[in-house]
Image: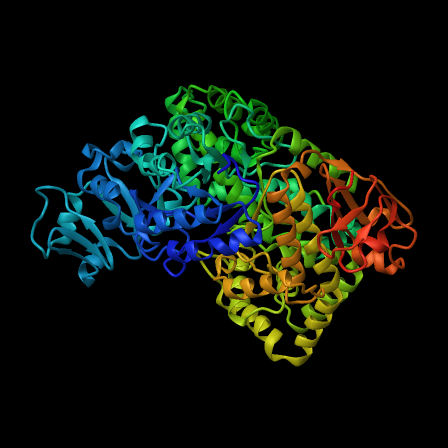
């Protein structure tokens, strides 16, 4: 087994698709051509968890996912298929939704600061008056006690269905729950107070995920003992680290992980802003691939559509189309002042403890300055002293935006720039939270010029990239991080790869899209133009879809946008009209016909984009991942839609037909995509010597700009871009690609061509992509 994968295939483990089921598809994954199987989190998670990121016990494999026997069975099946195993791990936080399921959390609730696990969690005991604040109440304590919602049962305090332990010696009369509650090491408080008063660090704004202090050696050892066993016993070969930016010292953590695992293959889920690079001193081979996703999408976007779509977006948005940087400043600031204000206040306490206490600097001003620096911070986080320039840039912008606060901002900056200051460490942990919630989960739903651009890890301000720019970025990836993962879809993407591939075609037909949107808004106006555009793009991009899936997407997207409704206070009237719009797509013949007409216009080029992106990803620099099921068309929307079950039986049968000689048409079955995926994965696994360099190949002719061509060291990938424009111009015509001397065989069709000036129309006669290799025995 190689120490690093050639490619991976991601599986989402649940109680309904447990390790035993994963073991049963290992032979299919091997036949498909995947090199390693890539598993979602394995450790014991909260009951009913569909994702596994809410770990409750670090010492065992999740029972509902098959337990240790299931992992053993999976590992054995993987070995039989020649597959390695990559496992997702969660070092930042634990699930605490049901306190009784988490022994660490239960102990802290029961014993308070005297618990042996008190230091394992990131708790500010002083801010809670010596108690851990639990934001769960939907009424006052007095009303809860009077109604029987707050009560004593045995040696537990109950609030509705929630269970909490009682401190030793604290039980009193069962009918005096208030008095008993007052004697605990925790305090149940109104759920709204999580935004302002919470005194434990969370995963973003999720109260049920409490952060742990993995920077402490004893916490690292306790939380990684089982993970390290997997590596040492050969059950798992590599690790994917979830959310390292939440850790106090990501670099130190990765060093500890490398030491504990003997230098195993490790990837980090790190979001890089456009032009940003990984800290070069980290013990990791690279990221989980969102940076690659952004590049692959943008080379397929038509720059000519930008001005029309910019203008349309400006007319739809309530802010008149403010620049992206200005928009995200305000959404980040709203997060800092809203759902993450408790983190800002805790930072304020630590900054003041560091000495920013002059009489002219009051508590509110310090908190205001911190929130402004967070809103102005240009990337997810720094790793001081690495990345100091980002903090300095935030200082400059904050002083410009808030001149009346300039002195306080400067004083706060001085503390935050000192790597030894606890406040500086916490600021770095917090900036990524504000960025993620303010950008990915808010601003991404407020801009709509092209929804395929608003994807995790992408910069919507960058509309498209040229072929030359795309090649340069791939060459940089090969040079710097050749073992970094690349991806097109994940369990966290806002839209699946082929949903985005179809939406990107709108850049080629902006006038037709504007007319379609105008008709739809006239018939079903919501009064929120930007959101309506996002919704219609997503409906058309994913069509045909199930009614329930579109209702769920519309509700989540509208509440995330926060412009017309929201999670904390949903607007029933707006949401009713929104759901009526979704129903009309299915029930109103005129609406259905209009949607299907637009899909008919976009779909052929969307399929071309889908195959182009997939081939370029699978043959490009890095370690390509295939997200579960995406070997066929992947037209999902945001989670949980992108985590839905996969029909592996249908995929097995279709792959068998392809291997028996079927050459599928470019239709909605997705068989053509399966052909591309299987042939590219197999070639990359079986002939790695063909993928040792990255050399762009020149194309000459009237349609040369529509071709992406690259020699990877003996394997040549050819992909069509901007298919609508290509068809409008009459096709490939006189365009040729200059190939090295042949003969060359296309892995997709079996066609053999000579090298030299080869007509593209001949190479791409059947599909918009080709994968060429030298005929066996040729020079």
Residue in view at x 43 percent, y 43 percent: 87
Q: Nearer the viewer, residue 368 or 67?
A: 67
Q: In the image, is residue 418 above or below residue 595? A: above
Is residue 570 left or right of 768 when viewed as pictured? left
Q: How many marks?
A: 0
Q: Position of residue 501 (x, y in %)?
A: 68, 56
Residue in view at x 68 percent, y 31 percent: 476
Residue in view at x 37 percent, y 55 percent: 49
Q: Position of residue 470 (x, y in %)?
A: 73, 40
Residue in view at x 89 percent, y 57 percent: 729
Is residue 156 left or right of 741 when viewed as pictured? left
Is residue 210 left or right of 279 when viewed as pictured? left
Q: Position of residue 308 (x, y in %)?
A: 79, 54
**Observer able to see residue 301:** no
Q: Quadrant of the C terminus?
A: top right
Q: Nearer the viewer, residue 653 or 218?
A: 653
Q: Nearer the viewer, residue 203 or 238?
A: 238
User: Residue 561: which quarter of the image?
Assistant: bottom right
Q: Position of residue 773 (x, y in %)?
A: 73, 45
Is residue 625 left or right of 207 when viewed as pictured? right
Q: In the image, is residue 30 above or below residue 603? A: above
**Observer able to see residue 340:** yes
User: Residue 586: which quarter of the image?
Assistant: bottom right
Q: Residue furthest front?
A: 777
């Amino acid at each position: 087994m190689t120490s690093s994968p050639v490619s991976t295939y991601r599986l989402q483990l649940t109680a309904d698709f447990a390790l035993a089921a994963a073991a049963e598809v290992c032979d299919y994954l091997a036949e498909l051509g995947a090199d390693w199987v890539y598993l979602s989190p394995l450790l014991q998670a909260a009951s009913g968890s569909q994702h596994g990121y809410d770990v409750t016990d670090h010492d065992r494999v999740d029972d509902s996912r098959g337990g240790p026997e299931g992992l053993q069975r999976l590992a054995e099946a993987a070995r039989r298929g020649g597959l390695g195993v990559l496992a997702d791990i969660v070092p930042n936080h634990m699930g605490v939704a049901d306190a009784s399921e988490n022994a660490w959390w239960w102990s802290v609730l029961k014993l308070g600061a005297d618990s042996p696990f008190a230091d394992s969690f990131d708790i500010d005991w002083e801010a809670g008056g010596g108690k851990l604040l639990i934001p769960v109440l939907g009424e006052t304590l007095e009303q809860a006690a009077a109604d029987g919602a707050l009560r004593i049962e045995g040696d537990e305090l109950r609030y509705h269905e929630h269970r909490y332990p009682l401190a030793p010696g604290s039980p009193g009369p069962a009918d005096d729950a208030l008095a008993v509650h007052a004697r605990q090491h925790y305090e149940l408080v109104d759920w709204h107070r999580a935004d302002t008063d919470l005194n434990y660090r969370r995963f973003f704004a999720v109260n049920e995920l409490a952060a742990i202090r993995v920077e402490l050696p004893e916490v690292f050892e306790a939380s990684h003992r089982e993970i390290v066993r997997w590596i040492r016993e050969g059950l798992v070969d590599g690790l994917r680290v979830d959310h390292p930016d939440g850790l106090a010292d990501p670099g130190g953590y990765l060093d500890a992980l490398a030491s504990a695992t003997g230098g195993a293959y490790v990837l980090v889920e790190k979001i890089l802003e456009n032009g940003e690079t990984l800290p070069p001193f980290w013990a990791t081979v690279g990221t989980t691939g969102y940076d690659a996703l952004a590049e692959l999408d943008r080379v397929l976007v038509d720059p000519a559509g930008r001005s029309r779509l910019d203008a349309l977006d400006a007319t739809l948005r309530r802010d008149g189309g403010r620049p992206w940087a200005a928009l995200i400043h305000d959404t980040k600031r709203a997060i800092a002042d809203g759902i993450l204000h408790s983190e800002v206040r805790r930072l304020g306490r630590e900054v003041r403890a560091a000495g920013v206490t002059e009489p002219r600097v009051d508590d509110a001003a310090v908190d205001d300055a911190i929130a402004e620096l967070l809103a102005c911070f240009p990337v997810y986080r720094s790793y001081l002293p690495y990345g100091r320039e980002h903090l300095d840039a935030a200082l400059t912008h904050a002083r410009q935006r808030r001149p009346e606060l300039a002195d306080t901002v400067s004083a706060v900056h001085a503390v935050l720039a000192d790597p030894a200051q606890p406040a500086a460490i916490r600021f770095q942990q917090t900036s990524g939270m504000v960025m993620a919630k303010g950008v990915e989960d808010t601003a991404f739903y407020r801009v709509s010029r092209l929804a395929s651009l608003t994807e995790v890890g992408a910069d919507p301000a960058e509309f498209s990239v040229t072929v030359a720019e795309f090649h340069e970025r791939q060459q940089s990836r090969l040079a710097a991080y050749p073992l970094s993962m690349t991806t097109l879809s994940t369990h966290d993407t806002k839209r699946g790869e082929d949903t985005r591939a179809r939406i990107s075609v709108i850049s080629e037909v902006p006038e037709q899209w504007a007319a379609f949107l105008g008709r739809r808004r006239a018939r079903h106006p919501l009064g929120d133009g930007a959101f309506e555009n996002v919704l219609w793009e997503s409906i058309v991009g994913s069509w045909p879809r199930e009614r329930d899936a579109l209702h769920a997407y519309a509700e989540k997207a509208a509440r995330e946008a926060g412009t017309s409704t929201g999670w904390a206070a949903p607007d029933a009237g707006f949401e009713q009209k929104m759901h009526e719009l979704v129903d009309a797509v299915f029930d109103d013949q005129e609406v259905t016909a209009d949607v299907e007409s637009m899909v008919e216009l976009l779909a052929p080029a969307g399929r071309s984009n889908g195959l182009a992106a997939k081939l370029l990803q699978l043959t490009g620099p890095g370690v390509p991942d295939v997200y579960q099921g995406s070997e066929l068309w992947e037209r999902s929307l945001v989670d949980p839609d992108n985590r839905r079950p996969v029909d592996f039986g249908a995929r097995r049968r279709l792959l068998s037909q392809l291997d028996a000689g079927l050459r599928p048409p470019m239709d909605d079955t997705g068989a053509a995509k399966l052909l591309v995926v299987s042939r590219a994965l197999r070639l990359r696994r079986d002939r790695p010597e063909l993928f040792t360099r990255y050399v762009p190949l020149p194309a000459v002719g009237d349609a040369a700009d529509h071709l992406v061509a690259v020699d990877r060291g003996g394997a040549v990938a050819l992909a069509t871009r901007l298919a609508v424009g290509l068809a409008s111009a009459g096709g490939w015509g006189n365009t040729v690609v200059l190939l090295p001397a042949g003969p060359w065989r296309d892995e997709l069709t079996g066609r053999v061509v000579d090298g030299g000036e080869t007509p593209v129309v001949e190479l791409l006669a059947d599909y918009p992509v080709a994968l060429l290799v030298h005929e066996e025995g040729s020079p």
